[in-house]
Image (cartoon, rainbow, N blue to C red):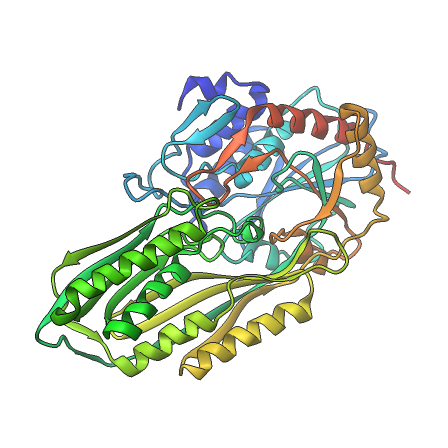
Amino acid sequence: MSQEIRSLEPKVLWNKFADLNAVPRPSKKEERVIQFMKDFGNSLGLETFEDEIRNVIIRKPATVGMENRKPIVLQGHLDMVHQKNNDTHFDFLTQGIEMYVDGDWVRAKGTTLGADNGLGVAAIMAILESTTIKHPAIEALFTIDEETGMTGALNLKGGVLKGEILLNLDTEEDDEIDIGCAGGIDVTATRSYYEEETPEGSVGYTITVKGLNGGHSGMDIHKGLGNANKIMNRLLFDGFENFGLQIAEINGGSLRNAIPRESVAKVIVAAMYDEAYVFDMQEIIGDIKAEFKNTEPNLTIQIEKSDLPAKVMDLGVQEGLLRAIYTAHNGVYRMSADMEDLVETSNNIARVIVKDGEISIQNLTRSSVESSKMDLANALRSAYELFGCEVEFGGSYPGWTPNVNSPILDVLVNTYEKQNGEKPKVIACHAGLECGILGTNYPGLDMISFGPTIHGAHSPDERASISSSQKFWKFLVEILENIPEKN
């Protein structure tokens, strides 16, 4: 691990982050980081245990003079999104993240950084280890699998936590205090199809869409970024309509909560259309690049000759597939009528796989309004069912309804204004925070979310601001000293 990371201020925060980032921690494979966190708690002599779903809870008594303050829960998630550039050789299951300093930013070499939510987790670790910071009684809650289902929060049973206030350290702009978030639901469409022999007199091509920014499918969905699956579908649809293109394979996108950056398709066209097809595609590519010239300046679309596949998709099924993906909504569906500039409902067509007679289309639909979430989910289901798919809803989790009268909100707003000379932005976000889920089994818990500035989360461009992390740490420490007294 680079010493330049460990020498950053505040050292207590960055050293804990460096320790954490040395431990592989993919969602649903958190065994090593769970053990790492248990070893950490036990090494401090603090009460440390797992719950039934394998969340880790560490309890620390109040410091002297703070015993009469309300007990708090400090919460972050242990897992991280694993994304890397195509030309980056990296094994997330065995390697620690390779970090470096770039001006005011900490970045990773060709991969996600894990600042989401590693910096929040590191801050909690530093608080637990400190012998000088004043604080009330603390329960540190480290949840698992936040990024691919929030199963840690969903399965945390009532009665485990004793705190009255929850500080979630998992937002990404240091001038924002979050009091609400979107819920979500996975919409998965699948069906099988007949593969036919590749016709004689065909030419094989590989189409590649890459170089897109990608990003968080909640926090970045309003930015007009390109979705590789939607762009690929346009290319395939045009080739099918005008030249009878047939699909052998599609592999687009990766994780549901990441805007797709890349897609690759293997196709054929009749040799008689070879030159005309390539010419037409160059015109389409030019149009798409012009549309995205400001938001996606590094977009690359390649059409290259390749070996003929042995089999291709039946044309009838193929037409249904292309029309269904064209119809399916991607991006912002509705803006909030209650909070300015807040996305209420959206969808991310995250993953499209076509191979060996099987189709899978994976979506993540988000909304801060449950009825709107289900409205869009049903619209997607209808588009896919008309094409003959089986559609499954899964991983549904609730949003977090804002409470503008929260007592802890007053503490944070006053502390922020005192430290920075201006009021923070009090917002709800379009990401899926765990607060809404945790509030289901702990309805009386006063919850709030904040964190340091992190850009490009869920993509290899993820980066954490060094100066913002200093601001965040100072903010957190003073909040702990100003937790209200028990009623």
Which corner quadrant of the image does residue 175 belong to?
top right
Percent across and percent down for residue 4 are 45, 17
Which residue shows up at 64% across the image and 30% down it? 128
Query: Residue 87 vs residue 37: left or right?
Result: left
Percent across and percent down for residue 29 are 42, 50
Which residue shows up at 57% across the image and 18% down it? 9
Percent across and percent down for residue 12 are 58, 22
Name the residue nearer the viewer: 408 or 257.
Answer: 257
Give the residue furthest to the right. 487
Which residue shows up at 43% across the image and 70% down it? 326
Percent across and percent down for residue 148 are 49, 55
Which residue shows up at 56% across the image and 54% down it? 152
Give the residue furthest to the left. 200
Residue 197 visible from this viewpoint: yes
Residue 155 visible from this viewpoint: no
Query: Residue 466 vs residue 99: left or right?
Result: right
Counting the numbered discs, the total is 0
Q: Quadrant of the N terminus?
A: top left
Name the residue nearer the viewer: 292 or 178.
Answer: 292
Q: Quadrant of the C terminus?
A: top right
Give the vertical position of 214 relative to 17 (above or below).
below
Query: Residue 100 vs residue 64: left or right?
Result: left
Give the vertical position of 185 relative to 470 (above or below).
below
Give the vertical position of 266 relative to 410 (above or below).
below
Which corner quadrant of the image does residue 192 belong to?
bottom left
